[in-house]
Image: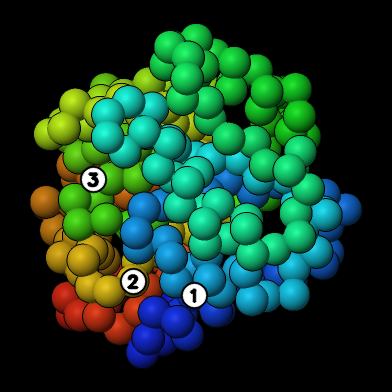
Amino acid sequence: MNTISYPSAEATAQKLAERIQQEVEKSEIYYLALTGEMTAIPLYQALAQASIDWNKVQVYYASEIVSGAKKGFHHTLAQAHLWDKVNIPTSHIHPIRTEVAADAEARRYAQEIMDTLPKVSGVPRFDLVLMDMTSDGHVAGIFSGQHELFLEESLTLTNNHPSSGDEYISLSIPTIESAKSLALYAFGGEARFAIGDIINLLPEAKAYPANFIASRCPWIYLYADAESMREKSYSIY
């Protein structure tokens, strides 16, 4: 796993936003999948300030909460801190719907991805999938210890949060792995122990979906501020 770190969340998020800006500039159409809760705010703010031609970007979600008190939160957060701040056509944003049954929506979203994304050997391919790194190593609505979902073959899946029971719709890990580029991000230090476990190859990391993806996709990048890298004692890649 490749790591990029700066002292502050703002500086680290800006570096990731600059990378996306450069990739969009080189693309005719840029297919982006994102997900994140409150830790995504520094990144969304950096993306809103970057000189990105959003007319060239098609945006999807790597996961969404579709039941409970936080239903639709990933899209709501991105709307407030990013989409309301930039000039992106509404038709270029592809949210996961929360008003229909999860299984039906997962199938519909998978079909939308299949119909609209470019494909490599018949598999839809995002240019970049962005995922927030969390304290328990979960990514994109797949949680620690849920090994039965790590190799789910469908493009999308439904899942439940192990504590709250809230239902999620997510891209499957094989769909995520098929992307041209992958990036995790972590700000504020919440994920520092999970990051330390992964970088230092500790046994605890085996339960983390983030570690599973990193082990299968060594080209993945982690953008993490200094607080989030505090438990990095040594590195083996």
Residue highlighted by disc 1: 13
In this view, the residue in front, 158 or 177, is 158
Amino acid at the residue labelled 2: Phe
Q: Earlier in the sequence, mark 3 or mark 2?
A: 2
Amino acid bearing label 3: Tyr
Q: Amino acid at mark 1?
A: Ala
Q: Residues within 10 Å of mark 2 (few under 14, many from 20)?
A: many
Mark 2 falls on what kind of element? Answer: loop
Q: Is residue 186 left or right of residue 147?
A: right
Q: CA distance from mark 1 to mark 3?
A: 23 Å
Q: Is residue 181 above or below residue 145?
A: below
Is the C-beta separation of discs 1 and 2 under 8 Å?
Answer: yes
Residue at screen point 58% across, 35% down = 95
| Most foreground residue, 110 or 48 | 48
What label sits on residue 187 in the rendered view?
A: 2
Query: In terms of sequence position, does the residue under pointer 1 or pointer 2 come before the other?
Result: 1
The Cα–Cα distance between marks 1 and 2, rounded to whole angstroms, is: 8 Å
